[in-house]
Image (cartoon, rainbow, N blue to C red):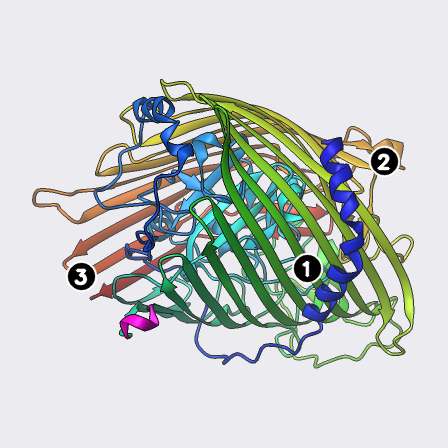
Amino acid sequence: MQLWGGALNSLGMLRSAVLATASAWVLMPQASLAQSSAQGGAQNIPSVTVTAPEARRRPAATPQRRATRSSVQTADRNKPQPRREVGFVETPRGPVNGYVAGRSSSGTKTNTPIMETPQSVSVIGAEQIRDQKPNKLDEVLRYTAGVRAGTFGADTRNDWWLIRGFKSDDIGLFLDGMQLFYTSYASWKLQTPNMERVEVLRGPSAVLYGGSSPSGIVNVISKMPPAEPIRYIETGVNNFGNAYIGFDFGGPVATQPQDGKLFYRVVGQVQNGPTQVNFTPDNNYFIAPSFTWRPDADTTFTVLASASKQDTRGINFLPYQGTVTSAPFGKIPTSFFVGDPSVDKFTREQEMLGYQFERHLTDDLTFRQNARFAHVDVTYRGYVGNGWADVNTATLNRYNWYAKDTANQANLDNQLEYRFDTGPVRHTMLFGVDLRGYQIDDYQLFEVGAIPSINVFNPAYGLGDIPFAAPQFQRNFRITQKQAGTYVQDQMKLGNFTLVLSGRNDWVETTQAARDTGATVASRDDSRFSGRAGLIYNFDNGIAPYVSYATSYNPIIGINAATNRLFLPETGQQAEIGVKVAPKGFDGYFTASVFDLKRQNVATTDPVITTLQNQTGEVTSRGIELEAVANATKELKFIGAFTAYHLFTSKDLNPALVGKTPTNTPEMLVSGWADYTFKDGPLAGFGFGGGVRYIGSSWADQANTLEVPAVVLGDLALHYEWQNWRTALNVINLTDKIYVASCASATSCFYGDRRRVTASVSYKW
């Protein structure tokens, strides 16, 4: 690792050039994409064949490296192989067969079997998404080991999740292998109808991806243009009256032989209607066109675009007494809206344009380049709950809030993959240079005392837009970050052993300027090396124990509320041991892992003003994860997960917090889901599924004196397919349990989703 660190640091001469290129990317003109149709609710997703690699056109002798491997290949053939449908060839960017994925690229950036990856990886495919019908991305993750999804309950604005106890939705969200970072309120929204698979990589990943969460990443893989025609429409509505209609069209385009092959796809959805909270709509409009061009068998070029618009309102910030515990009057209704419908709004406009390019230079050498430019514009206005004015009269305080955040992000990732042998050792080497540019115009206002209180049972609305008189907090900055990284990785196979060694160095420039004058307020330059080593052994009986160690580095964009200066970079390290089991003749696998993860310079929510953040010293997460996924029979699919960890503050400037668990963080999660579909007989086409989720207790205060109770939730699915039609009825929170999802503080608690029943019908031809 030290040798690689020195080698990568010797590339410092590239620093100025690559950072200048990253700067040019982030300051490029905004992509002008058409803004029409649709986002929102889940969609039944038909099986499609994505364009698969063709036979190489140019003749080539069998490489010597393959000829010298007959004994290894024979051993590989004797290993247990998962059952696959005839004709199904899985790729890391393509569909998953049932619930069981065999390959992933998130852990290595190469096409690697999950059973040969010495790190915890979970993959949620489009079929599982279809069966469970999640309304947004965090709901996709509800049955995944190590993930607490929907941290803030029934929030329509954003997707929220913790990985191994740490908030990761802001720095751990990736789309097609490239980060979608956000800070302040310039968050991104990805659409479930356009998700082919969602991969969760747990543990530090900075060695391949640069700045990211030390606890892991969520990598969403977009739907790609298919080789066979697909024509699909769906519509549905839930019990709150929120309805949607979506479509998915694609296939080959007629071309002349000399022009290569061309494929296209257009996915879109319109969603509109109310939710469980009064005056809070969830209106979404989304469209995502894409095309793939293959001029020859060695070259693939795919362009991916999307545009979306969301119109909703902010989440309720409610007190602990009156939600978790009873107030003198009982509890606050879950439908209560604490703001003012004449003022409150949350709108997001988002556009993305990018491409994926791959060229096989030889049989053993492949070049890939992935790029994307993304723009988001968020306006958040509202009167926000701020604790009891008088609990005996059920009157809540409110503060005045406004945020206008606009952000641009550009990514460019260059990869060169070289496959070769050194004696009996097979190598897959990966060399990469990636550039990232990010810029946010961040404008926020906060004022206490200007907004009248509101009665929970007799709310008076229609106050109009009350101007800010003397805001206690104001932010008006333009923050720019330019990051360049070089990385190298070697996957070495010797017999049944696979050793993965990875190293990376990042150079980062961060600048904070005043938006009104343009004057630089603060700046910092950072450089850091990250490393990873992992070893896995695949026994012939399907058992694969592994061990890994990794470090991470994340140059946070943001302001420390205590010092009003740029955050220090976040660092982390993790040791993990585990075992993966794929029984012979069984289409599925089981995993178990234990880990010790430390995260330094953690950004945490200010206990007084929950819109602000400070940095603590260190938080430690130690735990165990169990996961099972299987296509048990042709009729039955199931998944199960168990997570238990001890999360505590291990270093802090406040000694009283050492040993305490951070707020809104449960330390135990258990879930299981199964789906059964009749394939034969009079019930052929009919299916049903269901799941149970246990979310452990958490804390509403840093001193760990206010407990948020654990909760058990049930989900249900009924579906029927006949010819080209599919109808479905999906229910989350089957018993309509009223519960608090979490509390960030004693004045910031959030109700979870009430029972939501969604009826849908789809047709494909």
Of all residues, the one furthest to the left in this rendering is 682
Q: Is residue 480 left or right of residue 359?
A: right
On the image, numbered disc 3 is attached to which residue? 724
The amino acid on which the numbered mark 3 sits, given as a three-letter code, is: Asn
Quadrant of the snapshot with the N terminus:
top right
Residue located 31% across and 60% down the image: 759
Q: Which residue is label 1 attached to?
A: 436
- Residue 96 visible somewhere in the drawing: yes
Label ID, residue 652: 2
Task: In this rendered view, identify the residue nearer to me: 458 or 663.
Answer: 663
Real-space Cα separation, disc 2 to disc 1, in angstroms: 32 Å
Rendering quarter of residue 649 = top right
Q: Secondary structure at mark 1?
A: strand
> Range of the magenta residues?
256-260
Q: Position of residue 102 (x, y in %)?
A: 38, 38
Above or below, comparing residue 550 to residue 754 in the picture: above
Quadrant location of residue 454? bottom right
Label 2 vs label 3: CA separation? 60 Å
**Mark 2 or 1, closer to the camera:** 1
